[in-house]
Image (cartoon, helix red, strand yellow):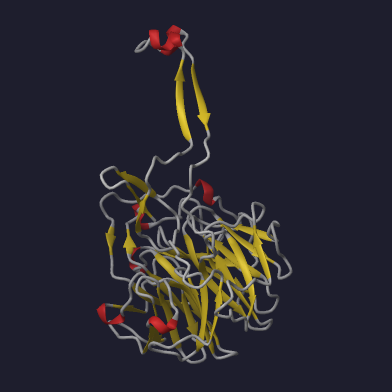
């Protein structure tokens, strides 16, 4: 999700669970001596204390969206609470209402859902494919009738930091973008457990850099990948080769070794890269959308309108939806931009083009809402419907995965990297 530095004013000490090492009297007397020779023993005592208070967003934070057009349902990933929420497609929260209740929710300790950042819905069966990023290495699959704290129908072992998902329904192949090391891994759609990918797009020639959103054009046999821009070179220019070989039936991704070359980290300009749909290995892109005219700034998910040959890109940092021609290349301006206070956009991170109903559906991580527009909406245009998961104006701290924190003693504030 979005990476930010947050400042919280907290007037007293912050209580955390602590690990305290306790030494015996004999150890203190023989400090500096060989523990084996002195017979000293060490004991670790775990003191678990409840926090005096918690800074947490109790409401839903929508990280991605898919529409089941055949069953008139909107599926939204709630990354705040690690749940999948299903709404009616035409749901619209009245201004005076606190929120709209989902039709069903999947979530809880048995689901293996955590940091769920991408979702796909099978158009034939209604099965839900949920991608876990950062802290888990599972893709979970749920049949349409599943709800509550239940185990998934099947799971697939994936790398950490997977982010986007797209499926080629003609060949039954599943494309999953991975941020670090930047790559696109392709599995059979029915893959599960330790099934190995059928191919992997990775390497310096690919120009992938923190791969995020992914989309496929089966009509023109093209693969689109959005990149935030962070990059570090891998030794031997191969990230997964140690645990995967072409044609292998299974792999053990949990035993992988990621070996980055020290000093090669850099920030590259965000981009949308286009490849042949069957691209494999260190394949360069056919073309790249990149440059200041594009307005790309840490793009999130993308959605491809194959019928009208338009590419929709979320701008979570700049609160906008960018639309490009699918054939665009180089430093080109979007053909449309949806942006402004009337739009209701708030850190939009997920987007879905619904061609059947000629609508555009957005998942907003920054204001507890999903906003729906006419497909061709542009400028400061209000949504035609809004699904809210919190009262109007409820603040959203936009927590993702908190990576580090420190305390400012002078200002009595915590600085939190997210």
Quarter that holds the N terminus:
bottom left
Q: Compared with residue 254, is residue 202 higher up or lower down, i.e. above or below?
A: below
The reply to whether residue 249 is visible in this rendering is: no
Left or right of residue 353, residue 268 in this image:
left
Nearer the observer, 411 or 261: 411
Q: Compared with residue 241, is residue 77 higher up or lower down, i.e. above or below?
A: below
How many numbered discs sit on the rendered protein? Answer: 0
Nearer the observer, 255 or 36: 36
Quadrant in which residue 410 is drawn = top left
Nearer the observer, 344 or 169: 344
Provide residue 349's location: percent of width, then percent of height: 45, 71
Provide residue 87's location: percent of width, then percent of height: 64, 75
Left or right of residue 389, residue 108 in this image:
right
Left or right of residue 24, residue 411 in this image:
left
The reply to whether residue 164 is visible in this rendering is: yes
**Farthest residue toward the right?**
145
Nearer the observer, 270 or 380: 380
In the image, what residue occupies the spot 30% across and 86% down? 333
Provide residue 167's location: percent of width, then percent of height: 57, 74
Quadrant in which residue 275 is drawn = bottom left
Q: Compared with residue 69, is residue 122 higher up or lower down, i.e. above or below?
A: above
In the image, what residue occupies the spot 60% across and 90% down? 356
Quarter that holds the C terminus:
bottom left
Left or right of residue 297, residue 353 in this image:
right
């Amino acid at each position: 999700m979005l990476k930010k530095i947050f400042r919280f004013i907290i007037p007293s000490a912050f209580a955390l669970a602590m690990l305290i090492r306790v030494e015996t009297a004999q150890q203190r007397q023989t400090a500096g001596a060989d523990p084996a020779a002195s017979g000293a023993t060490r004991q670790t005592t775990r003191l678990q204390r409840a926090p005096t208070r918690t800074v947490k967003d109790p409401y839903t934070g929508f990280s991605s969206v898919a529409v089941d057009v055949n069953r008139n349902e909107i599926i939204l990933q709630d990354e705040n609470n690690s749940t999948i929420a299903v709404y009616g497609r035409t749901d619209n929260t009245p201004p005076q209402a606190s929120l709209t209740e989902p039709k069903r929710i999947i979530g809880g300790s048995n689901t293996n859902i955590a940091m769920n950042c991408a979702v796909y819905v099978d158009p034939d069966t209604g099965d839900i494919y949920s991608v876990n990023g950062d802290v888990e290495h599972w893709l979970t699959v749920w049949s349409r009738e599943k709800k509550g704290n239940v185990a998934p129908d099947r799971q697939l072992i994936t790398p950490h930091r997977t982010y986007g998902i797209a499926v080629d329904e003609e060949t039954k192949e599943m494309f999953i973008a991975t941020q670090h090391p930047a790559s696109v891994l392709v599995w059979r759609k029915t893959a599960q457990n330790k099934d190995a990918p059928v191919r992997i797009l990775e390497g310096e020639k690919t120009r992938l850099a923190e791969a995020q959103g992914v989309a496929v054009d089966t009509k023109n046999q093209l693969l689109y990948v959005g990149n935030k821009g962070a990059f570090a070179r891998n030794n031997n220019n191969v990230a997964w080769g140690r645990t995967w070989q072409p044609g292998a039936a299974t792999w053990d991704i949990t035993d992988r070794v990621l070996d980055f070359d020290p000093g090669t980290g850099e920030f590259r300009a965000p981009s949308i890269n286009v490849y042949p749909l069957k691209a494999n290995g260190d394949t360069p892109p056919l073309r790249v959308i990149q440059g200041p005219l594009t307005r790309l700034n840490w793009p999130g998910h993308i959605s491809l309108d194959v019928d009208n040959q338009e590419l929709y890109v979320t701008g979570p940092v700049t609160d906008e939806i960018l639309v490009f021609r699918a054939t665009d290349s180089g430093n080109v301006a979007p053909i449309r931009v949806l942006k402004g206070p009337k739009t209701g956009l708030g850190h939009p991170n997920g987007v879905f083009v619904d061609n059947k109903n000629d609508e555009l559906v957005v998942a907003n991580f920054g204001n507890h809402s999903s906003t729906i527009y006419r497909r061709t909406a542009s400028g400061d245009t209000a949504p035609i419907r809004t699904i809210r998961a919190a009262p109007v104006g409820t603040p959203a701290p936009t927590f993702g995965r908190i990576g580090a924190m420190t305390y400012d003693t002078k200002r009595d504030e915590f600085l939190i990297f997210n």
